[in-house]
Image (cartoon, rainbow, N blue to C red):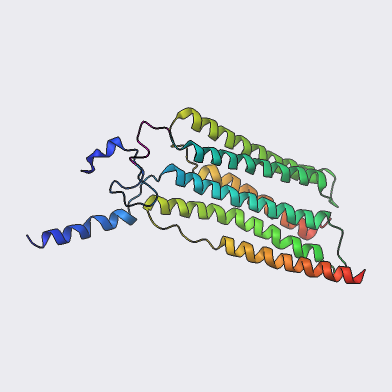
Amino acid sequence: MSDGAPARRGYGPPDGTSPYGPNAERWPADRPPPTLAGERTDLAWNRSGLALLACGIAVARGLKFPVAEPAHEVIGVTILVLGVFTWFMGQWAARHRRRSGHDRQIASFRDLAPVAYGTAAVGAAAFLLALFFPG
Amino acid sequence: MDDAPETEPETEPEPSAASEEYEPDPRFSYANERTFLAWMRTALGLITAGLAITQLLPPFDLPGGRRLIGLPLIAMGTIIAVVSLRNWTANEHAMRRGLPLPRSPLPLITAVVVSIVAVIGVVLVIVEGKGS
């Protein structure tokens, strides 16, 4: 009975009990993956990269330090690099997803961790900056 | 022989729900990823707002007034960045096992912190207005 599995795409348990899953009728193997959901995810990556870029520009241009002049530019450029990295990562993932024609390009922990920990590092640096060097 | 059909269902369906992992429909994984990214932008927004308050606003009469508003926002943004990654992982695991999604305290904590900061901001602005 459950040997009909090769025909289906393989999401969720074969008995169809998972709430996150099996849509054998709606997503047969020869059908392209759900592209609209993928497109929204690509756009979310795009916005996240742009948000980091804006944060980097604000730091590089707007902050006042009592320390050496280039310090804020160094921090700003670091955030900008993180933003460019995020943006390009999103674009690369989107391109790869469109080209490959399959839907296994779901982000892994290793994809997301640099963005999360990078943002946390920016936050920690901002906290120390705001605590000890208010403008 | 009569007992046999009763014992079979006990061994089969229960473990399949919780212990085995299955690839979820990609739309759910995409939604999980977008939620993570939305939290990441929220974190960045809070950090940037906190930095702008402490660095760019003219000082209040109350010493440390800008930091009183800005530091909680920056701290909240930093916490969100780390916790949202943990939430993404927990959601992904739950979906693969067919379990209900775990409830996150992050929306409540964010709402409380931002509300408190907003109230402090309003009080500071009112006090400043009376003083001038």
Per the rendered image, the range of residues in magenta is A24-32
Residue B76 on image: x %, y %: 65, 60
> What main secondary structure does the magenta stretch of the protein show?
loop
Q: Residue at x 69, y 52 (%)?
A: B45
A114 to the left or right of A23: right
Residue B79 on image: x %, y %: 62, 58
Q: Residue at x 27, y 58 (%)?
A: B14
Which image quarter is the N terminus of chain A in?
top left
Which image quarter is the C terminus of chain A in?
bottom right
**Residue furthest to the top:** A99
Residue B71 on image: x %, y %: 73, 61
A102 to the left or right of B82: left
Q: Is residue A81 above or below residue A129?
A: above
Residue B17 on image: x %, y %: 32, 55
Q: Residue at x 46, y 53 (%)?
A: B91
Q: Residue at x 8, y 62 (%)?
A: B2
